[in-house]
């Protein structure tokens, strides 16, 4: 049996596609375990010229995933940065942005926001105003228009993607596909090929896939989603993943303060003083509640 090492470039259900030495291989896992993510470096055993079994996942530098009460969904492995795509229209959800940022900070992944469709001027100022809460915490916000100003969009984003493994996430309708098509020439063709190779039976875009941008750069596109559960984060991980809380941690009267209703709490004092956005503290309370519900 021939052994190879490859990178997982697409995942759909239990079907995986790996790239090894320039060849694409349809892969399955041994047994029922499906803990493989796009971006994983894997050891493979070839079972035919274009098929393989995944023997082992190499140690990951990072892992981004979301989880609900019952299961977790791996988004990508070994990524160095996360781009959250929002737009002037349709409206974007602050809850999803904040949850994505918390997930990135908890996983040690740099995060930025991409404001798309800035040529839709009616919604531009309001979108900018809403994003100030994130830029004030130190998250970069990059403004682009994939369809209105394609050349400028590439000029803005291409340097940010160099030497990085980047994942793009966002709600449906934010123009994420337009951005991918700009940044990855032939992305449509690649998607059709991958869809056929995954043997999903239909041309689907509901799978996560990785595109190479150069020898040491890649971009991962994930399906649009509306929910981002973080049930896997413990209390201690949560407070540290809210970067706006950091200056105030350790300034509470009680060492085991949960920052919910305790007296003389540094975080609550900062919320009252307007130094931490109220919506961020409300999300923190919601996430604490969710982490207490975990069953898996």
Image: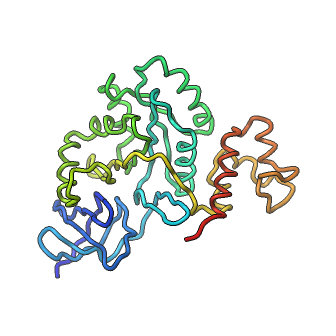
State the image coordinates of residue 174 (x, y, percent, origin top left): 41, 35
Quarter of the picture holding the C terminus: bottom right
State the image coordinates of residue 79 (x, y, percent, origin top left): 41, 54
Q: Answer with the quarter of the image where residue 276 lies.
A: top right
Residue at the spot 46% in from the left edge and 60% down from the top edge: 63
Query: What colour-coding does the image apply?
Result: rainbow
State the image coordinates of residue 59 (x, y, percent, origin top left): 41, 70
State the image coordinates of residue 273 (x, y, percent, origin top left): 79, 36
Vertical placement of residue 111 versus 4, above or below: above
Q: Nearer the viewer, residue 128 or 279?
A: 279
Vertical placement of residue 36 versus 92, above or below: below
Q: Disc count in the image? A: 0
Residue at the spot 25% in from the left edge and 75% down from the top edge: 53
Vertical placement of residue 50 versus 165, above or below: below
> Quick one: which residue is furthest to the front in this view?
201
> Quick one: which residue is furthest to the left in this view?
49
147 left or right, relative to 64: left
Quarter of the picture holding the N terminus: bottom left
Residue at the spot 27% in from the left edge and 64% down from the top edge: 16
> Quick one: which residue is furthest to the top in this view?
122
73 left or right, relative to 273: left
């Amino acid at each position: 049996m021939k052994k190879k090492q490859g990178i997982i470039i697409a995942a759909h259900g239990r079907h995986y596609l790996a790239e090894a030495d320039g060849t694409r291989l349809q892969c399955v896992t041994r047994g029922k375990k499906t803990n493989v993510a796009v971006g994983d470096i894997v050891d493979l055993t070839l079972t035919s010229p274009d098929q393989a079994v995944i023997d082992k996942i190499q140690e990951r530098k990072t892992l981004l995933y979301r989880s609900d009460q019952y299961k977790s969904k791996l988004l990508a492995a070994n990524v160095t940065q996360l781009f959250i795509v929002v737009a002037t229209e349709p409206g974007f959800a602050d809850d999803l942005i904040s949850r994505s940022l918390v997930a990135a900070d908890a996983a040690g992944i740099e995060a930025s926001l991409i404001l798309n469709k800035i040529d839709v001027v009616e919604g531009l100022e309001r979108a900018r105003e809403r994003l100030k809460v994130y830029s004030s915490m130190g998250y970069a916000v990059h403004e682009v228009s994939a369809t209105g100003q394609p050349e400028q969009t590439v000029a803005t984003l291409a340097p940010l993607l160099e030497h990085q493994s980047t994942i793009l996430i966002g709600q449906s309708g934010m123009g994420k596909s337009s951005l991918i098509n700009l940044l990855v020439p032939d992305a449509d063709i690649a998607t059709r090929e991958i869809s056929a190779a995954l043997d999903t039976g239909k041309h689907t875009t509901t799978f996560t896939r990785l595109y190479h941008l150069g020898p040491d750069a890649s971009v991962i596109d994930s399906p649009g989603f509306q929910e981002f559960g973080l049930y896997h984060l413990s209390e201690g991980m949560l407070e540290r993943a809210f970067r706006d809380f950091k200056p105030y941690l350790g300034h509470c009267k009680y060492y085991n303060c949960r920052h919910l209703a305790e007296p003389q709490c540094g975080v609550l004092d900062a919320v009252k003083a307007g130094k931490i956005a109220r919506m961020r503290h409300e999300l923190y309370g919601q996430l604490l509640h969710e982490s207490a519900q975990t069953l898996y």
